[in-house]
Image (tube, grey):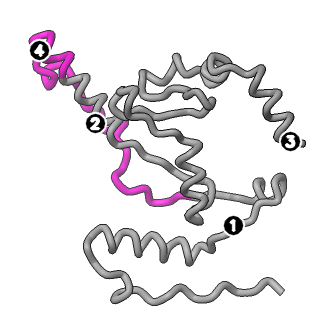
Amino acid sequence: MLKGVEHELMDKWKIQDAAETYGIRHWSKGYFAINSAGHVTVHPGKRADQAIDLKELVDQLQARGIQLPILLRFTDILRHRVGEVHAAFKAAGLHWHEYVVLDEAYLRPAEVHELRGDASKAAKKLGWTPKTTFVELIHEMLEHDLTLEGVDPTKHLRKPPAPVSKS
């Protein structure tokens, strides 16, 4: 039943509707767009042939057991923007360091000392429950970081404790 409703809505909903709803042209600077499926895409280098479909990415992460909310960082966007600024100064024959003032009040700390989240609203309104415990999440993150450093996590980590039953 829902599929029929979705299909009917998608017949009326056009890509331009999504772009206008999200206000893409006001904030994307060419790094974000809407694809033919109506999904938001990321173009870290502003190249149309290098698009990351955010819906597909989130679906893939969830299929791997990574649950929402998910924080995604696209460091290539910052790198590309800095490159554009440098190129603009160079094209104008100017040295950027003579014009750019660093105000430390606007610097973000390298490490965030406290992050808090509250999933109670998702639990209450959507009936959502996490599929991964906090301890399992930390274990998964440590495994990933150790693997990135070329260290065998099985030699350094114990298996996470079994989840406590809620009976």
- In reply to whether residue 41 is colored magenta, the answer given is no
The disc, 1 or 4, on the residue closer to the chain's N-terminal end is: 4
Q: Name the quadrant containing residue 35.
A: top right
- Please report the residue visible at 24 percent of the width from the left and 22 percent of the height from the top: 85
1 or 4: mark nearer the eye: 1
- Tell whether label 3 touches label 1 (CB within 8 Å): no
The image position of residue 40, as x and y in percent, is 56, 33
Q: Quadrant of residue 121?
A: bottom right
Residue that badge 1 annotates: 130
Q: Residue drawn 53% across and 48% down?
A: 57
Q: CA distance from mark 1 to mark 3?
A: 25 Å
Range of residues picked out in magenta: 87-115
- Give the alpha-carbon distance from disc 1 to disc 4, as whole Å: 53 Å
Q: Earlier in the sequence, mark 2 or mark 3?
A: 3
**Does label 4 or label 2 sit earlier along the sequence?**
2
Report the Cα–Cα distance between label 2 and label 3.
Answer: 42 Å
In terms of sequence position, does the residue under pointer 2 or pointer 1 come before the other?
2
Q: How many marks?
A: 4
In whole angstroms, how far apart are the C-alphas of marks 4 and 3? 58 Å
Which amino acid is tagged 4?
Answer: Leu
Image depth: mark 4 or mark 3 in front: 3
